Image (cartoon, rainbow, N blue to C red):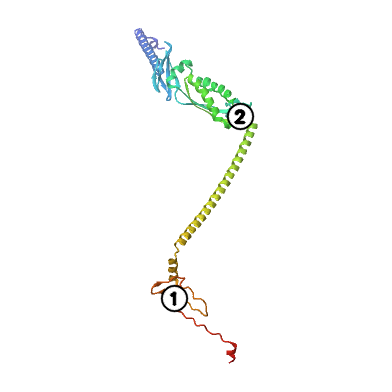
Amino acid sequence: MNQTSDIRSPALLPKTKTLRGKVAAQVSVLSVVAIIGVFLLALLVASWRTIQPGNVGIVFDKSVHRINETPLEPGWAFVNPFTQNIQEYPVTIQTYSMLYQGVEGDDSIKVQSREGQQVNLDVVIQYRIRRDEVAALYLDWGGAGISVVEDRLVRQYTRSQVPAIAARYNWEEITSGKRDELSEQIWQALTEEFSRRHLELISFGIREVHLPASLQKALNNKIQAQQEAEQQKYQLDQEKVKAEQARVKAEGEANAMRIRAEAEADSNNLLARSLTSDLIRYEQLKRWDGRLPTFFGGGAMPLMPLIDPSGMVGANEPASSTLTATATPTATPTDEDSQQ
């Protein structure tokens, strides 16, 4: 057995222990530094918050129990993670719906009409937080988030007001006749309460009305009857229009005939007034062919206007006064002459 291998030099032991102690000390220092670094990094990360677009942030300082009334705008914000907390609120328009969703559940608002019929209403609400009242909203609601505000005010208050106002109307008015009026009444009731709680009501609407089967059938029958009545009225109006068109056309034709007759009568009257004796003689002369009439047998001399060197002769003057015309009668043979 080699005894020299088990023998350690006494001079080397203190040096080894010293080296190990230094290494351990350095490791400890590095560990502490690393821990401090991680802590500082975590603290730095926790000190920076991001305000989402469309939101503003309210800073609450727990050390002094006060809030910063100036909201933080969207972007990065630095806070003390030990004493300060940020609550974000949306300042854009929010939409909250209470609808009948079939298999997913019925969240519509159940109301009773004036005659006691149950009707379900699908409603849609649009609102937003007043930007200059965000700090007041935080204080009034105890720092609660927007989900709490929606549940307690937008949802619960609306579901309490809608049935109370709808009970003033019968089911037909709720369905169609006064649906807009009902929406307006509800909107006015909600606006006052929303404003008092730092919200601005943008709109309230009844999207759909769900009726029981019996009322739905009655409504369908009524709508069908109204459509048929409107169709009949339309046809009657068309017949009236056609009759009016025919009447106007007949009146137009009659007026045209009357105007033509009046024009013709006026023309005849004008012509009659213009037919003087000289004009008549002139027209006769224009139509004369220059030949005298030939007469056989006796009889009166015709009244024919002729032209002589001295001018025109009137129609009532005998033609013989200007031109001598002799008519020689022809003897008619007798029986005695024929026997000779």
Quadrant of the image containing the N terminus? top left
SS at mark 1 in the image: helix
Q: Is 266 placed above or below 47 here?
A: below
Residue 219 visible in this rendered orientation of the protein: yes
Residue 99 visible in this rendered orientation of the protein: no
| Viewer-nearest residue: 48 or 139 | 139
Residue at 54% over, 25% down: 186
Nearest-to-viewer mark from 2 and 1:
1
Q: Report x, y in % for residue 268.
A: 48, 60
Answer with mark 2 or mark 1, whichever residue precedes in sequence.
2
Q: Report x, y in % for residue 258.
A: 51, 55
Q: Amino acid at mark 2?
A: Trp
Q: Report x, y in % for residue 133.
A: 44, 19
Quadrant in which residue 232 is drawn: top right
| Viewer-nearest residue: 311 or 107 | 311
Q: Is 284 placed above or below 193 here?
A: below
Q: Among all residues in the image, which is located at the extreme right?
A: 214
Q: Is residue 34 left or right of residue 118?
A: left
CB atoms of marks 2 and 1 within 8 Å? no
| Viewer-nearest residue: 59 or 340 | 340
| Neighbours of disc 2 within 10 Å: few (<14), some (14-19), many (20+) | many
Question: Which numbered circle lies on residue 185?
Answer: none
Residue at 47% over, 59% down: 269
How far apart are labels 2 and 1 at the CA level? 113 Å
SS at mark 2 in the image: helix
Question: Which numbered circle lies on residue 171?
Answer: 2
Q: Among all residues in the image, which is located at the extreme bottom?
A: 340
Q: Amino acid at mark 1?
A: Ser
| Viewer-nearest residue: 106 or 309 | 309
Question: Which numbered circle lies on residue 321?
Answer: 1
